Amino acid sequence: MKKKIVITIIMVAVFVAALIAVVVIKNNTPATGKTQSYSSMEEAEKAAPFNMDYSDRLCGYPATDFEANSSTIEVRYAEAGFIRKTLGVADNSGNNIEYAESSEQSINGLTVTCKGNDGLVYLAVWNNNNFAYTISVNEGVSVDEMTEYIEATQ
């Protein structure tokens, strides 16, 4: 009888220890889909299953923040805007603004949708190799300037 009680206590202790280990691991591991900020692209790329090429500057501003999760990498440029790359082909811009102008541009064999106002582009979205891309700027830029940013982004 004592042997059964000892075995039961040991089994309960092992179960509790395993449960505690699972809770500790879960609380110290970022949840899938939860975006975290990093100070460098190298750190951000460790959180995503792909790499990203991007422009060093956007509208004159250097890259200041790198965010990533299991499906997205985003580069933020202080006051200027962001560049985002996401697994999949759905529009990843998160932008619902109704722009007065929208056109499709052919840039290096890619079909890029550019949106803006008064001849300036504020948003560019496109797909390439099962990735969706967005470049969003707070101050509009020319099509030529946006083209430079698009060409630097992979």
Image (cartoon, helix red, strand yellow):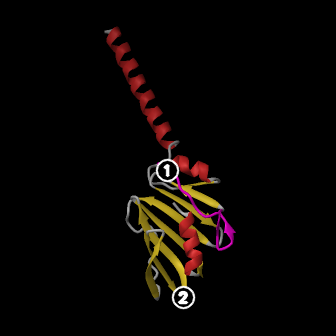
Q: Position of residue 46 (x, y in %)?
A: 54, 46
Contact flag, marks 2 and 1 (Cβ < 8 Å) = no
Report the residue marked by disc 1: 48
Q: Position of residue 149 (x, y in %)?
A: 57, 69
Q: Which residue is mark 2?
A: 119
87 relative to 39 in the view: left or right: left
In the image, residue 78 sits, relative to residue 11, either above or below, namely below
Q: What is the magenta range?
A: 49-63
Q: Is residue 76 magenta?
A: no
Q: Please, is residue 4 above or below residue 42 in the view?
A: above
Residue 94 at least partly seen: no
| Residue at position x 46%, y 51% in the image | 70
Res 102 → quadrant: bottom left
User: Label 1 is placed on what type of residue?
Assistant: Ala
| Residue 114 place in picture, x, y as percent | 47, 78
Q: Secondary structure at mark 1?
A: loop
Q: Amino acid at mark 2?
A: Gly
Q: Secondary structure at mark 2?
A: loop
Mark 2 and mark 1 lie on one chain; the one further toward the N terminus is 1
Mark 1 surroundings within 10 Å by alpha-carbon count, few (fewer than 14), some (14 through 19), many (20 or more): some
Q: What residue lies at 60% left-to-right and 49% top-to-bottom?
A: 42
